[in-house]
Amino acid sequence: MTSEHGTDRPGPGFGAVLRDHRRRARLTQVELASRAAVGVRTVRDLECGRAARPQRMTAELLADALGLCGADRTDFLEAARGHAPAAPPAIDAAPADAIPADAGAPPAPRVVRLPPAADLIGRDADVAELAAELTRPGSEAPGGVTLVGLAGVGKTALALVVAHRIAAAHPGGVAGIVVTDGSTAGEILGGVAAVFAAGRPDDLPAQLAGRSAVLLVDAVERSPDAVAEALSRLRERVPGLRFLATGRHSVGLPDERVRPVAPLVAPSADSGAASGEAASYPAVALFLDRLARVGRSEVGPDEVAAAVTLVRCLGGLPLAIELAAARGRVLTVAEILDRYGDRVLDLSRPDAARPETVVSLRDAVDASYRLLDPAERYALRRLAMFRHRWSLRLAEQMLADGPTAGTDVVHVLDRLLGLGLLSVRGARSSRFRLLDVVRDFGTERASAKGELAAFRRRHAAVLADLAQQAAPDLVGGDLTSAAARLDDVAGDLGAALTFAAGEDPHTALRIAAALPCWWQFRSREVTGRQWLRRLLDDPRTADADPVVRAWAYAGLARLAGPQERAAAQIALASFERLGDAAGRVTTHLLLAVPARGEPDEARAHAEAALVLARRHARLRDVAIAQHHLSWHDIRVGDLAAARRRLAEVERLARRCGDYRVRAVAVAALAELARLDGRPEDAERLGRRAVAELDTVGLAAPNHRRRVLATIGLALARSGRFAEAAALRDEVPSVSLAGTELPGSGFPWAGVPSAEFSAALLDGGIAAGRGERARAAECFARAAEAHAVGDDPRDLVAALVGLIAATPDPAVRRDAAHRLDVLCGSASIALLPWERESLGTIAADPADPDVA
C-alpha cells in the first residue's frame, strides 16, 4: 500500500533477503508477484537492486505471499525498512520434509490483511462518514467508494484507517492490493484472489461464501483501464465484495461513489488564531506533530503566528506540511516560512523507491495536471487567476472567450473536482477554489506559456463587471447581501485593482468607481479615497468613459465628505452634461450634506434632489432628500415641518423595504421630540429606534449611540436621573467609523463622536440634579469634542448647556460669543426653550456679562 507519510530510509541487502525467501518457498518471480498482488517488475526491481526498498504495503503483501510469520516475518519487514537483515535460512540447509506440503498455496485467510493504520489528524469526520457508508446494508450501500485527490493529500492513510475501522462488519475479510504500472486485469484479479486466500479468481465466490468483504485498491491511476475491468468483473461475480479505492481520479464504475479528499483545515487570514486556538486547526496540529517527530521542542508563543501563516501558505496539504516540518531539523519556523512560504511547489523529498530521484510538490500536481486534456489545462490556468473562492458565474465569465469560449464550465469544474484539484465548500455561490498548490502551479504554467498578463487582464475585467453589477444594490434593502457578495471576492478585487492600476487603468477605474458604497459600509474610506485619487489623477484615464469618471468623482466626494465638495461639483456637472438622472440625484444628495458656512446651498441641493427623485419615482432618494431637509427645518426652528418630513421618510422607507432608513427616521423623530420639549415621546420613540437599529445591525452602531444619548437626556429632563445614569453606561466609549445614513451611503448631518455623546449626557444629568459645576465641566468637554463636519446643532446644545451651568463669567462670555458666531454662520435659530434658558440667565443681575 502506498505510504504518503513514510520517512524510513532504505537499507542494503533487501533484494537478497527477498530472493532467498522466494526460493525457499519454491516460487518463481511471476508466482510471487501474482500471490502478492504486485507487479512482476516490482519483484524483479527489488531483487536486482534497481529499487532498494519496497513501500510499506508492498512489503506486507510480499511477507503474506511468502507465508512468513514469527521471527522470519519480523526480520523480513525490518530488512524492508532498511535495517540490517537477518540471514535467512539457506534453501539447501533444511531437510525436504521441513518444507510444508502446501508451501506453494496461499496463506490461510485472516480478517484483515492490511498494514497497520497510521495516526490521522483532522480526519475524524471523514472516517466516520466513510465507515458508515461502507457498512450500510447491501441494497443501501454503494458498490465502492473512490477517494480522489492530489498525491500527498492523505488518501491512502485515510483509506487504511477506514478499512481497519470497518473490518468487524465484514466477515468475509478486508484486504488490499497495490496497483502497479502496466498491471493487466488478469494480474489484478489474481492478486485479489491471493489476498483473500483463494486459489484462482473463479474461486472467490466460494471462498467468501456470500459473506460481505471489502477490497482496498491503492493507486488506481497507475493502470485505470485494467482496474475498471477487474473491479467490474468482481462486482458481477462476487456481489458481496465492495471496494475502497484511492487514486488521482475515479475508477468509473456505475455504482461507484467518488469522494474528493480535501486538504486539512487551516486558520483563515482573518481568524486571528491565538496560541491556544491555533492547534485546534488540523493543519496546524499536523505541523506541530511532525515538528515534534523531527526533534523540535514545543513551538513557542512567538512562533505560532509564523506556523499559522506557513500552514496557510501550504494550503493544508499533508504532504506539504510534512515536507516543511522536516526542515525543522535545521530551520526555525520563521525561517521555514521565509524560505518556502512563497515557493511551496519547490518542497521536495527523495523518492522512497528510487532514492536518487527527488519528488517535489510540483511533480505531484503535474501528475494530476497531465491527466487533463489541453482545453481543461487551459481552463485551469485561467481559473488560477482567482486568489480566493469564486462562483460558477465568475468561472463562466473567466472562460467565456478564447479557446474556452462555449465550453461547458460545469463539466470542467466536475473534472477538476474529480481529480481532487478543486475544493468546493458550503452552499454559497462563491464556493469553488483551486487548491493552493494547484493555483500556484497553474499560475506558474501560465507564466511559462506567456499567458499570465492576458489572463490577469481578463481577471480584472471580470471583477470590474462584478463590481458594476453589484453597485446598484449597495443601497437600500439589498445592501447587506450585495456587500456580502463583494466580501466573498474582496481579495480578488484588491488583486485586480493592483494589477489593472498599472497595466489597464481604465478597468481599474471601472472597479474603483463601483466600490465607494462598499468601502464606506466596511469602514475603508481611506483605502477608497487613495484608489480614486490615484486613478483620477492618472493621465491614462483622461479618456476613460465619462460616466465612469463622473461616478468616480461622486465616489470620492462620498468617501471624503464636505472637504471634497469640488469633486461632487465636477460629478454633478458631468452628470448634467450626460443627462444621467441617477447620477444627478446622487450628487445633489452628496452636496446636500449640511456644511458649515453653506447651509442655504446645501438646502438648495436637497430640494433639487427631491424634485428629481419625485420626477423619476425614486422613492428611496425622495426619503433621503426629505431626511436632509428635515435637518434644515430644525436649523431654522420649524419643528412641525421637520416632523412631517420625517414621517414621510418613515412611510417611504417602509414602502421600498429599506429598514435602515426607517430606523434612522425613527431615531431622528426621537431627537425631534426631545428638542420639542416632549421627553416622554422622545423616550418612547428612542427605545423603538434602538430596537430597529439592533435589528438592522451592522451599519448602525453610531446611530444607536446617538439614540441612547437622546433617551438619556429625555430621562434626565423628566427627573429620572438614576435611569439616565444607567443608560449612560451603555454609550460606547469608542467611536466606530462612519457617519453615513445606514444603508444609504449618503452622509448626512454627521453623527457625534462617542466622547461628545457621553459628555453631553453627563452634562444633562448633572444639570438636572442641580450640580452646576459638574454640568459646566461636562458641557465644556462636549463642546471641545465637537469636530468640524459634525452636526452644528449638537454644538448648539453643548454651548447652551455650558452657558446655563457655568458660574465663571469669562467662560460664559466666551461660550456666548461662540454660540452667536455658530448660529450666524449656520443660520441656526434657537428653539424657544433654549432662548428661555439664556433669557433667564440674562435677566439675572448676578450675571451682567450675558446679554
Image (cartoon, grey):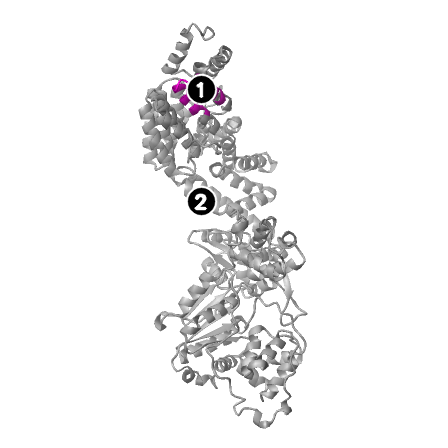
Residue 771 in the magenta stretch? The answer is yes
Count the labels in the image: 2
The picture places residue 91, in percent across and down from the top left corner, at 63, 89
Foreground residue, 459 or 414? 414
* Residues packed near mark 1 inside 10 Å, few (<14), some (14 to 19) or many (20 plus): many
Q: Is residue 821 left or right of residue 637?
A: right
Q: Is residue 416 visible?
A: yes
Circle nearer the N terminus (1, 2): 2
Q: Is residue 827 visible?
A: no
Measure how far apart labels 1 and 2 are at the Cα level. Answer: 45 Å
Residue at the extreme bottom = 96
Question: Which amino acid is tagged 2?
Answer: Ala
Highlighted range, magenta: 759-781
Vertically, is 431 above or below 829?
Answer: below
Where's the C terminus, which quadrant? top left
Vertically, is 310 above or below 764?
Answer: below
The picture places residue 802, in percent across and down from the top left corner, at 45, 17
Residue 524 in the magenta stretch? The answer is no
Is label 1 or label 2 in front? 1
Local SS, label 2: helix
Q: Quadrant of residue 256?
A: bottom left
* Residues packed near mark 2 inside 10 Å, few (<14), some (14 to 19) or many (20 plus): few
Decide: marks 1, 2 in contact (CB < 8 A)?
no
Vertically, is 566 above or below 312?
Answer: above
Local SS, label 1: helix
Q: What residue did someone put label 1 on?
A: 775
The picture places residue 795, in percent across and down from the top left corner, at 46, 20
Q: What residue did someone put label 2 on?
A: 484
